[in-house]
Image (cartoon, rainbow, N blue to C red):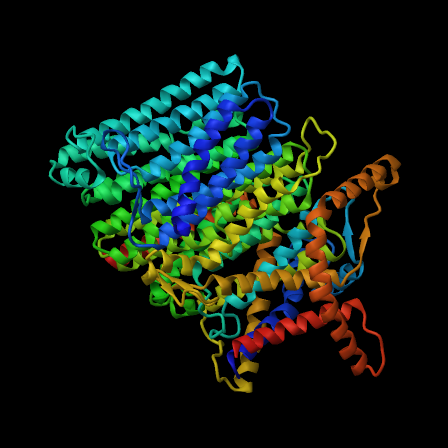
Amino acid sequence: MTTAVLLLIQVVVAIAIAPLVLGVAQFVASILRRTERVVPWRLYGTIIQAAKQGIVTPPNASWVYSFSPIVTLGCSLALLVLFPLITSSGILIGVADIFVVAGVFLFLETSNTLGRMERGLPTSPLVLSLIFTTIILAFVTIALYAGSVNVMDAWNASWQSAPILLCAIGALFLLVLAGRLAHANHSRNFTGFFRATTMLAEGLQLTVLGVFITTLLYPFGLVVNGASTQDVAIAIGVFVLRCLVVSVIFGALEGILVDKRFVTSRNVLLLAALCSLVGLVLSVTTTLL
Amino acid sequence: MTLFEGSFAVALLAPVVAIAASIFLRGQRVFQWNSILLTLSGAAGMVAGAIGAIQDAPFTLPTPVFFGMTMALDKFSALFLVPLSIVVFCAGLYAISTSKREDATNRQLLGIMSGLLLVGMQWVLLAGNIVGFLAAWEIVGLSTLMLFVAHRSIIHLRLALRYFVFTQLGFALILIGYFLLSSGALFSDFGTLSYIAAQLEPRSIAIAFGFLLAGFGVASSLVPFHSINARITGHLPVHLAALVQSAVVMMGVYGFLRSLLFILPPLSIWYAVAVLIAGALSAIGGGILAMTEREPKHILSAVSTSGVGFTFFTMGIAMCLQTFGAFEAMNAALFAAILSVAVQAVAKCGLFLAVGARESQIRLRYVEIAALVLAVAAVGLPPLSLFVGNWMVGSTIVGALQSLTDVWYALVAVLLLVVFTLSVGLVTYALMRLFALTFFVSPKEEGPPVIADVWVLSSIFIPAALVIAIGFAAPRIFELIGAGPLTIAPGTWLGAIIAATGTLQLSIVALVIGGGVVLSWIVSKAFPRRPQETRILIEEEVIEVQEQNTVRDVVAARSIGIVLRGVWTDRCYLPAARVTHRVHAFARRGGEGSETNVALAFIVLALVLTLIFAL
């Protein structure tokens, strides 16, 4: 198969599975928190139902109210083509630079922040800095071992030969966890189509970063240009498996940690930034000393 | 007379005529003619600067003025003349509209001083020797002070005095720096100065460098010299505040960069460390300060401090790379610094004017969108122009990190990376907060909305369009100004910038992000809009206010929106919709297509185009 077809398959499969990833995470979290059970595939129905309601705009909302969820979903879709989820030879391989990827994340989070400001919700001034710092430092650490700043080549870095990479991977893990803690009830701020958009974007972000982390830990199951249909089917299967593992892990952590006093999204982000910094410093010192 | 000579002459003469007109005219006409002439000077300066930046030979003005002063426009000064002229042009456009409402008492003094400010800034760029440069510098400082004094009442005289002390302190530091470098020969030109400086002892160079860094730091509002400039800006009319915070601050960067590149001999890494520390403190400090301020103009001033700090930080990186002999990476960092300062000047000017428009009760969605574009551009988010500069800086640091063999230097590179990421994040939040405070919060003295005229709208839309265009045209611009080795395929939409770690194709990045956003927007258009049933809607009064606002928005938007909507509807949307309906009807053998299908057709078309492009 050509790279374009592989990328299209990656996008379609990821969009299709994103609500399930989020649903499974919520299901696991609901079991652990002993709250009302959430059916894993309920989000498909919720998203369709919310989308059918049309676009519901509060009377005093500005255009940013509509703009924020659309940009969030748009950036989440952009992330789908920049990360190696099913294929590592995307047509946009030349663009998937760490600064571009970090920039897209910053753009996404900026639109979220602006949306929160528009609705008068509290925002934390350090969140954007911490997210950007964590992503750049973690990816630079990975790039030092992978020999390339391209995110598509990141799986060349093996943590078995360089255990310090676990710091960078851990930082990304904490970043996703902070996102889960921050966005636990994020979609409730919206109604109608925008709620559907926000939930889908949330699911896509969890899928992209979660699967990327598992790919860094176990770099197999990615196909390249010219792969046979059988290989692609296996890669899709591996991807779905990764998604389920990710959703169970993050759902469990969300269920355990969400009500803890000091485990706030900002604290976890701070920890993620520190973890990425420690990872980079250790990798630089161990390589050069 | 060539186009370059003509435009250059107009750019230089228009502010002089503005000063003369301010002396002889009376009443409201002072402001009107002043703004028109400043706009004209800005427009001509853009043309002259653009041509000057492309041509190789410097253009020397034929008549030497007093004391052997020479004035010449070389490639380097032309690079700064372009953003200066853009800022002047936009501020002038805004002033054309606001001059009708301006009720200041000292009209003539304000007119003379704004003309003199522009003359001073142009002279700073053109000065070929020390005395000319210092004289121009003093004119800029004093005219800014007089603008403040002429505009405000006596209660702000203490602030004016403090500003005077600061400007004179900056001037004195620069004077001492150049005095030491030239061994007292202040009348020598920059070429001779460079020769004399190369003969000096390292200790004298170190002292002179310290004075110059501090002097230009005061002029550029670096931390800890930032507060007075921010306070002065808060009291100036918005177009003059834009001039001071965008153009005057840029002059400080120009002066330091000119001294660094053309006058001082190659310096050791400790000098680079000093510049890096000054830049990093301002980049982070400005960002933190911007988060604590509540007044939009003060937030913008703090963001300006952070931006200039970032430019000094980038210059420090370039100096470090020079000492390591990594000249390609040094070039990338230097051009990133120049691009960064130019884009920030344009974006800040547009933001000041947008804030001013909102304060004068112009409530228009297009202005808000333009302001958001400018804010995003000032931060450097992809795919807007400053992202190119940020990407070049980031890639240079990572490239250095990959190639360094000394662990301490590598740790410094990590520290630089942390400063870079933190400052970008802090400024992003500060600018989003500025946007929220300006456009989401109703001002205390909310009056009836003002219908924006074409001058105000142009003064905001032109910088917004420029900050988008500069990013995509960056490879071509770099090639034209002599930085061809930093580019691949410039002039094509696939043109890219090269850095130590790879290439950046901004058009593809824009396609990826824009594609995702446009796709989401098209899908959202397929769903009907309906109001939320809330308590507030039941109150008739609120409904009435909303309807009035909608009518006002429509009236205000009509002047520019009607043309664009007409072109979009008649030339793009309707033909595409017709074709889609026909195809759909054909497929269903006579069935009617709906709006949803049109949207779906657009999605399919976009996917097909992407596939074709990819294959």
Q: Residue furthest top?
A: B154
Q: Is residue A164 above or below residue B221?
A: below
Q: Is residue A135 left or right of residue A251?
A: left
x and y percent of residue B456 in the render? 61, 39
Residue B91 is at least partly visible in this image: yes
Is A271 or B570 nearer to us in this picture? B570
Q: Quadrant of residue B548?
A: top right
Residue B5 location (% of width, % of height):
38, 47
Residue A52 vertical placement versus A66 (above, below): below
In depth, the one of B599 and A130 nearer the eye is B599
Q: Horizontally, is A202 left or right of B303 in the view? A: right
Q: Nearer the viewer, residue B316 or B465?
A: B465
Q: Residue at x 78, y 52 (%)?
A: A56
Q: Is residue B14 left or right of residue B125?
A: right
Where is residue B94 drawn, in percent x and y? 58, 37
Query: In the visual, does A181 lie left or right of A187?
Result: left
Q: Image height check: is A24 above or below B206?
A: below
In the image, B356 versus A257, the foreground residue is B356
Q: Residue at x 66, y 47 (%)?
A: B366
Which quadrant of the view contains residue B32?
top right
Residue B495, how many percent across, how many down? 43, 65
**For residue A39, what is the image quadrant?**
bottom right
Query: Is B35 drawn above or below residue B525 in the view shown?
Result: above
Residue at coordinates 78% horizontally, 77% vertically from top-left? B582
